[in-house]
Image (tube, rainbow, N blue to C red):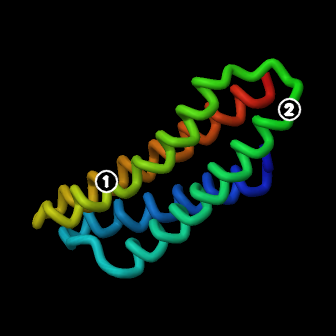
Amino acid sequence: MFAPLTWSLVALSLAAMVYAVVLAARNKRIDWPVLGAIGVVEVGLLAQLVVGIVQFSGTDRDVSGPFFIGYLIGSLIILPIGAFWALAESSRWGAGVLAIACVVIPILELRLHDVWTA
């Protein structure tokens, strides 16, 4: 895997999580800056999906294919689901849902890194 992309996705996702927690603490709905940050993370996750599939197809490592591809696809769909749920929720809990979705991304990224390097 391309480690700088993985670590930058972890950092961006955690930054978006902090912003969403601040919004939830201030009893605010999600706004355009947090959605923009989520969009940037999503574009990075899409790039990681493409890079991951290309690297997986050309490797001779003993990598579990279903787990690896599953983590790539799973990390790609978490943020849109969280964002749609956050937009539908008109209370502070919408920002809380988005914060939880943003926390899931670093967990999946670290697990993806473990699957690749193991």
Cα separation between marks 2 and 1: 33 Å
- Residue extending farthest to the bottom is 32
Q: Amino acid at mark 2?
A: Thr
| Residue that label 2 marks | 59
57 sits to left or right of 109:
right
Q: Nearer the viewer, residue 34 or 1?
A: 1
SS at circle 1: helix
| Residue that label 1 marks | 82
Q: Amino acid at mark 1?
A: Gly
Q: Residues within 10 Å of mark 1 (few under 14, many from 20)?
A: many
Q: In the rendered picture of this protein, how many numbered marks are placed on residues?
A: 2
Please name the residue shown 54% across and 38% down the image: 107
Q: Nearer the viewer, residue 32 or 60?
A: 60
49 sits to left or right of 82:
right
Q: Quadrant of residue 22?
A: bottom left
59 sits to left or right of 69:
right
Q: In the rendered structure, are the residues bearing label 2 and label 1 in contact, judged by CB atoms less than 8 Å apart?
A: no
Which badge, 2 or 1, is on the more N-terminal residue?
2
Q: Nearer the viewer, mark 2 or mark 1?
A: 2
Q: Quadrant of residue 59?
A: top right
Quarter of the picture holding the N terminus? top right
SS at circle 2: loop
33 over 91 or under it: above or below: below
Please name the residue shown 22% across and 56% down the image: 85
50 over 55 or under it: above or below: below
Q: Nearer the viewer, residue 101 or 54?
A: 54
